[in-house]
Image: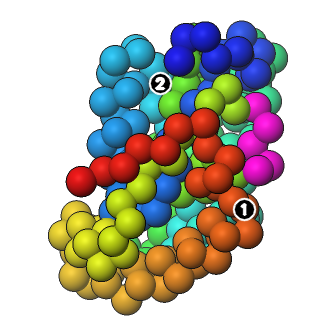
Amino acid sequence: MTNAPPRLGNTRLVAVDGPSGAGKSTFARNLAEQLGAQLISTDHFATWDDPTTRWWPRLVQALDAVAAGEPGRYRKTDWSQGFPCIAEGDEVTVSPQGTIILEGFSSARKANTRLSLAIFVDHGDEKTRLERAVARDGEKYRADFIRWQQYERGWFAVDETKARADYVVTSS
């Protein structure tokens, strides 16, 4: 991993992507600890009604600053009140450093040209992934996760995320 070239100024940006409930957050957390890397989650940006699109420029703006050797900043999405009461949360500073792990759905998208490495975490059984996500976030979000999984299937097919990944990790 340390051989991957930095493409974000002097910083390596590693994406850990995959479907909900596959185990990517746990994988990314462990990887960040091992590397002493900062961890950013796409959950800091996405919402149920905007899984991939309108928020992307906010992340790019923060990464542009890092590429220039400056700290990037953004406000996290505050999910604490649940949908549709999602608001802006705390400000996060992204430091230009050796490695940043960008974890979450759509983090390894084709448009993310600054990636040093893309990792796709998969667990092929959609029903198991659904139950994991519901167990993690609550039964009241089951219908949202079912819609989210439908969106994910389409996104991954068009974006070819798994096929383009440098590594595919299968979770159990």
Establish if 96 lies above or below 55. above
Residue labelled with disc 1: 159
Q: Classify residue 3 as left or right of residue 40.
A: right
Q: Could you tell me which secondary element the residue under label 2 belongs to? A: strand
Crowding around mark 1 (Cα neighbors within 10 Å: few <14, some 14 to 19, many 20+) is some
Residue labelled with disc 2: 38
In percent of width and height, residue 13 lies at: 63, 27
The disc label shown at residue 116, or none:
none
Query: Which residue is at 36% across, 49% downward?
Result: 170
- Cα distance in 3D space between marks 2 and 1: 26 Å
Task: Spot the residue most to the left.
Answer: 135
Query: Which residue is at 66% across, 70% downward?
Result: 157
In percent of width and height, residue 52 lies at: 66, 64
Residue segment shown in magenta? 110-114
Q: Main secondary structure of the magenta part?
A: loop
Q: Could you tell me which secondary element the residue under label 1 belongs to? A: helix
Query: Which residue is at 26% across, 72% downward?
Result: 128
Give the residue type at disc 2: Gln
Give the residue type at disc 1: Asp
